[in-house]
Image: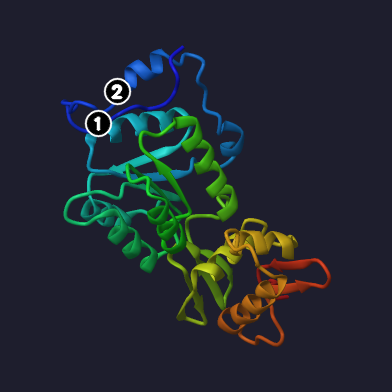
Amino acid sequence: MKPETTKYKKGASVPDGQTEFQFSTPDEWRAGHPQATPILAPMLSGGPAPRILIVDDDPNLLVLLADQLRADGYEIATARDGDEALRRLRTSWPDLLIIDMMMPRMDGLSLAREIKAQADLPIIVLSAIDAGDSKADLLEEVAEDYVTKPYHYPELRARINRVMRRLGDKVPRQSLVLGPSLTLDLHRREATVRGDTVQLTPTESRLLYALAANLGQTVSTDTLLARGWAETEDADPSYVWVTMRRLRQKIEVDPNRPTHLQTVRGVGYRLVPAKPDG
């Protein structure tokens, strides 16, 4: 069997001295992988398939990658440039985006910045740029992960799964109503408190993702620390305490007597709906 590295390069001609990359069509890829089954089926049972938006100006790569991801159980949408991606986002929010950096008109970095300004959606960069500094800058500012072209599909698939597990893929896409005074829209990084819209920071949203994915259950401080500051080597549990205090000031009617964001002393925190009247 051929290796699963997706060796593809734009353009038909290859200058002397450069490596020629081979391209497999979706039908060829399926034919070469008859044993391939949706590895995400256990995760998806009982719930909707995770939605991924792929943004790349190369139509052939869009077809190939979309076909590979659909074979693994994902719901896929594609966009050929930043403008088309933003139009799609106005009508439907994906669970994760895969974005190329080198695109005409609006490059991937500009697109990622605009997306992050609207919602805390996880982004994986898929780019031919392999410079260490560029990767570090993107991971620091806008990306949850970075994969270099030509990509190795099993590696990309594993990174997608890791990002979605870390950021809370079980959170409902629609608004989460916790009571008459509080509604959360975590994809848009917003809370509605007594009719007023409150903006949430990316870190606040990540912690609420983890809590909402385990609604009513206690989530340990260590788990919240990993969700909120996974890339920070010197992260301290006090970070969680400070962020929770700030969240209570934003989403609780009375921060000193929290209804929804409760402390489980010595263990962690839990997010609970309001108790019904009576």
Judge left or right: residue 233 versus residue 83: right
10 Å neighbourhood of mark 1: few (<14), some, or many (≥20)?
some
Which of the two labelled residues, at mark 2 and mark 1, occupies the earlier sequence position? Answer: 2
Residue 23: which disc? Answer: 2
Quarter of the image for residue 78 reads: top left
Q: Secondary structure at mark 2?
A: loop
- Name the residue located 34 percent from the left edge and 59 percent from the top edge: 112
Residue 274, x across and y down, in percent: 66, 72
Q: Give yes or no for contact between labels 2 and 1 (Cβ–Cβ under 8 Å).
A: yes
Judge left or right: residue 209 versus residue 16: right
Which is more foreground, mark 2 or mark 1?
2
Residue where numbered disc 1 is placed? 60
Marks 2 and 1, how far apart in space?
9 Å
Q: Which amino acid lies under the numbered mark 1 shown in the image of this protein?
A: Asn
- Name the residue located 45 percent from the left edge and 50 percent from the top edge: 95
Q: Which amino acid lies under the numbered mark 2 shown in the image of this protein?
A: Phe
Q: Secondary structure at mark 1?
A: helix
Q: Is residue 44 above or below residue 64?
A: below
- Name the residue located 46 percent from the left edge and 62 percent from the top edge: 140
Q: Is residue 220 visible?
A: no
| In the foreground, 195 or 257 | 257
Q: Is residue 233 above or below residue 241?
A: above
Residue 131, x across and y down, in percent: 37, 49
**Where is the C terminus found, in terms of image quarters?**
bottom right
Residue 82, x across and y down, in percent: 24, 54
Q: Is residue 232 visible?
A: yes
Residue 83, x across and y down, in percent: 21, 55
| In the foreground, 209 or 21 | 21
Q: Is residue 236 above or below residue 62?
A: below
